[in-house]
Image (spheres, grey):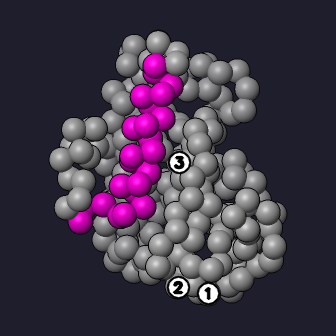
Amino acid sequence: MELFEIVDDDDNVIGTAPRSECHGNPALIHRVVHVLVVNGKGDMLLQKRSLHKDIQPGKWDTSVGGHLVPGESYHEAASREMGEELGLTGLPLTFLYKSKIRNAIESENIATFLTRYDGDVRWDEHEITAVRFWGADEIEAALGKEVFTPNFEEEWALYQSFQRRYVKERASGLGLCAGDSMPDVVKAIDQD
């Protein structure tokens, strides 16, 4: 039985509950990590969820998304999930922001990370039907048309807002950093 840590609104652990109880009971807030994988052109890798998924089967979603196991940090979960879902390991992860999703099905506290990758992807075929890079214009054209999960559409809005703020503050384009230190190790995406 897969257990999730249950947290309060401020992300303090207050207990555990089985996955089956967390999906379907929005009173049980649990932790989730998202990783946005972008290539050198700034296109974003999205995954098409398996038809066997209990939430939003068959829809396109965030590059990587998964639940934390008890005792795991967001950063550890992001690295683990990226390896499990896409076979990507050893890539630097840049923390972007935290967010919350509250709906009739579930309540999640989310930490989102960013990484850059330009190679081939070997995804988990049990969890994912397909992966591909999408340009921003392509994503914008498909919003609101039942192509994406509602959670990805919220994530996209947060990411766009983050990009506008970051680029405005830095006036040098979006850069990536390796882990929790050494900001801007990788050159700005739009300068490649």
Residue name at image x 46 percent, y 63 percent: 124
Dot 2 crowding, Cα within 10 Å, few <14, some 14–19, many 20+: some
Dot 1 crowding, Cα within 10 Å, few <14, some 14–19, many 20+: some
Local SS, label 3: strand
Residue name at image x 39 percent, y 47 percent: 156
65 displayed left or right of 19: left
Measured from the top left, where is residue 59 in percent x and y?
Answer: 31, 66
Q: Earlier in the sequence, mark 1 or mark 3?
A: 1
99 displayed left or right of 141: right
Q: In this view of the protein, can residue 89 be seen by the observer?
A: yes
Question: Would you name the residue on which mark 3 appears?
Answer: 35
Question: Would you name the residue on which mark 1 appears?
Answer: 21
Q: Does the magenta segment cover residue 55?
A: no
**In this orientation, which residue lies closer to the viewer: 23 or 42?**
23
Q: Earlier in the sequence, mark 3 or mark 2?
A: 2
Q: Amino acid at mark 1?
A: Glu
Dot 3 crowding, Cα within 10 Å, few <14, some 14–19, many 20+: many
Local SS, label 2: loop
37 displayed left or right of 177: left
Measured from the top left, where is residue 100 in percent x and y?
Answer: 56, 59
Measured from the top left, where is residue 182 in percent x and y?
Answer: 70, 21
Q: Please provide the residue range marked out in magenta.
A: 146-168
Local SS, label 1: helix
Residue name at image x 53 percent, y 75 percent: 106
**In this orientation, which residue lies closer to the viewer: 157 or 95?**
157
Quadrant for the C terminus in the image: top left
Relative to 17, does residue 156 appear above or below in the rendering?
above
Measured from the top left, where is residue 35 in percent x and y?
Answer: 53, 48
Tell me whether the residue at label 1 lies in contact with that at label 2, contact meaning CB atoms closer than 8 angstroms.
Answer: yes
Point out which mark residue 24 bears. Answer: 2
